[in-house]
Image (spheres, rainbow, N blue to C red):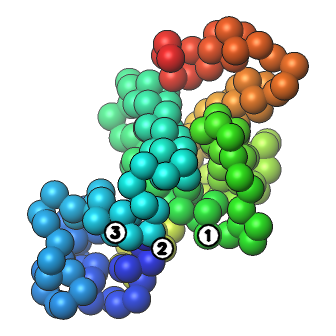
Amino acid sequence: AFFNILSQSTMLCSTANRCSELNYGKDSATASWYKSERLSLYSKLDEVFSVNTDKRKLINRAGKIFKVWRSKTFSTQTVKVPSIALVTIMYDFEKDKNNPDNYSSSIEMLRDMTYYGVVKYFKDKSCSGASSAEINLPVYQQDRNLLNRLNSAQRIDFCKNLVKFNEALEYSASEKVSEAESVKTLEPFIGSL
């Protein structure tokens, strides 16, 4: 919802600054946005996904798990994968799906989202396209590639970690795996549930 609003006008996102320093309030489309809504934009989410709907809860949970994974996986790195890159993966996943599945769990949704991210941005699970990978912010701005601050080795590392996380999610979402085993499998990636 956030990107859909922004992509309608190049004026909404300053070309000199990142979208986290959004040039909001300068036109009628953004005049009513609060300062706290620069990136979270809850009012825009509320318009698209009504509060307390199953899909909204699923997306919120998946996003939180993805964020925890990022924090835990890259905690020792000074230059981390930007969290907005994860939001962009989620956005692109939702947008590109022609027939969105009805997910019963955020783990299943994240499994498909992370696999989608690996294939779309890094070509495959062997990360063959990782060194030159781009995750572009889906709104106009001069520096759209959210991986620009990462060097080639860091992009490969991001891909490899995303692949490992995807494999853990894939195993955990399997019908043959118990809930206790799923929790144990995901613990190294996201801590205790």
The tag earlier along the polypeptide, 2 or 3, is: 3
Identify the residue position indicated by label 2 in the image: 138
The image shows residue 183, relative to residue 93, as above or below, that is above
Q: Observer-nearest residue: 80 or 53? A: 53
* Amino acid type, residue under disc 1 in the picture: Lys
The residue at the point 24 percent across, 86 percent down is 29
x%, y% of residue 175?
84, 25
Q: Nearer the viewer, mark 1 or mark 2?
A: 1
* Alpha carbons under labels 1 and 2: distance apart: 11 Å
Apparent side of residue 29 relative to residue 180 in the rendered image (left or right):
left
The residue at the point 13 percent across, 86 percent down is 26
Q: Can you tell which mark lies on residue 44?
A: 3
Mark 1 closeness class: few <14, some 14–19, many ≥20 residues within 10 Å: few
Q: Can you tell which mark lies on residue 95?
A: 1
* Alpha carbons under labels 2 and 3: distance apart: 16 Å
Screen quadrant of the N terminus: bottom left
* Amino acid type, residue under disc 2 in the picture: Pro
* Amino acid type, residue under disc 3 in the picture: Lys
Q: Quadrant of residue 64?
A: top left
Circles 1, 2 touching at the beta carbon (< 8 Å)? yes
* Alpha carbons under labels 3 and 1: distance apart: 16 Å
Q: Observer-nearest residue: 31 or 78? A: 31
x%, y% of residue 162?
63, 38
The tag earlier along the polypeptide, 1 or 2, is: 1
Q: Nearer the viewer, mark 3 or mark 1?
A: 3
Q: Nearer the viewer, mark 2 or mark 3?
A: 3
The residue at the point 72 percent across, 10 percent down is 181
